[in-house]
Amino acid sequence: MSSKKTATYGLLIALAFIFSYVESLVPIPLPIPGMKLGLANIVVLIALYVLGSKQAFGLSVLRIVLVGLTFGSLFSMIYSLAGGILSCIAMILCKKTKLFSIVGVSIVGGVTHNIGQIIAAILIVENRGIAYYLPVLLVTGAVTGLLIGMLGAEITKRLTVKLNINNHKCN
Amino acid sequence: MKRNDIILIIAILVFAFGTIVFFNLTKSEGDKVVITIDGKPYKTLDLNTDTTLNIEGEDGEYNLLVIENGVASMKDASCPDLICVHQSDIHFDNETIVCLPNKVVVEIESSESNEIDGIVN
């Protein structure tokens, strides 16, 4: 990793951290628990395209642990890790297949994030009734993934030029 | 956006819609009809016994509840809007017919404890 990329990595982690905090400050009144925009996911998506798979995964885990220790609890961290790790792995694999654009990869990330959290909830609460939330969370995951993906596409385009990084070399 | 992205979105929507349909088809049937007036228990009936019950209020209001072939429905009422009469038949667990003017609530319940309810509440 060049020093430029190392610096970018650090900046992105800080940005993801702040985004998580901002999102927790602004509670959007939504009927279903666990429904949120997932602002921090945009940073993971950008890291995946600008820096690479390993960095994106590291960033995702680091962010969740940092946020969990600072603002959350061990309990909320388990939910976040389940969603975050599953969604990050899914996005990395999806990008590797080259079937989807950044928007498609982001949608996969949004949907799998919600699936991961539902699986964690079913295991913790031991009640399969939670699965009734699944259809709603699938749709919201797709919608937020679409928005994040379109934003991410524009940002990645500009950031790659600015940093003069050839993002094909770091896959 | 690539064509595959759009296919992906459609696939997710179809899958989500499919699970909603699946959950609706596998809804558990109830077997008790619980009637309350103004929040107070009035009567509990068996959903599998055909009966006709005239639910009478204190000031002469009435709701005619009919249980037939395992479904409950409101056939007549004294209320002006008759919304309760126009509501469809109920027989799934937790389904309700509500008559707001007469404060009558007819709810289907199941004798087995309901797992889903425990979470939502």
Image (spheres, coloured by chain):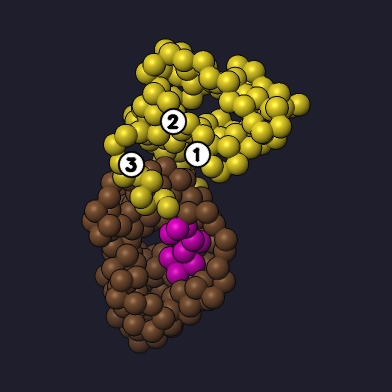
Chain colours: A brown, B yellow
Question: Does B112 appear above or below B76?
Answer: below
Q: Chain of mark 3?
A: B
Q: What residue did someone put label 1 on?
A: B41
Residue A3 found in image quarter: bottom left
User: Position of A29 compared to B23: left or right?
Assistant: right
Q: Are the two marked residues, 2 and 1, in contact with CB atoms closer than 8 angstroms?
A: yes
**Image location (x, y in percent) of residue A31:** 52, 54
Q: Nearer the viewer, residue B108 or A84?
A: B108
Badge nearest the viewer, 1 or 3: 1
Magenta stretch, residue numbers: A33-42
User: Position of B45 compared to B64: left or right?
Assistant: left
In the drawing, what numbered circle is on residue B114? 3
User: For mark 3, does the 10 Å Cα neighbourhood hold few (<14), some (14 to 19), or many (20 or more) residues?
Assistant: some
Q: Secondary structure at mark 2?
A: strand
Q: What residue did someone put label 2 on?
A: B44
**What secondary structure is the stretch in magenta mostly built from?**
loop
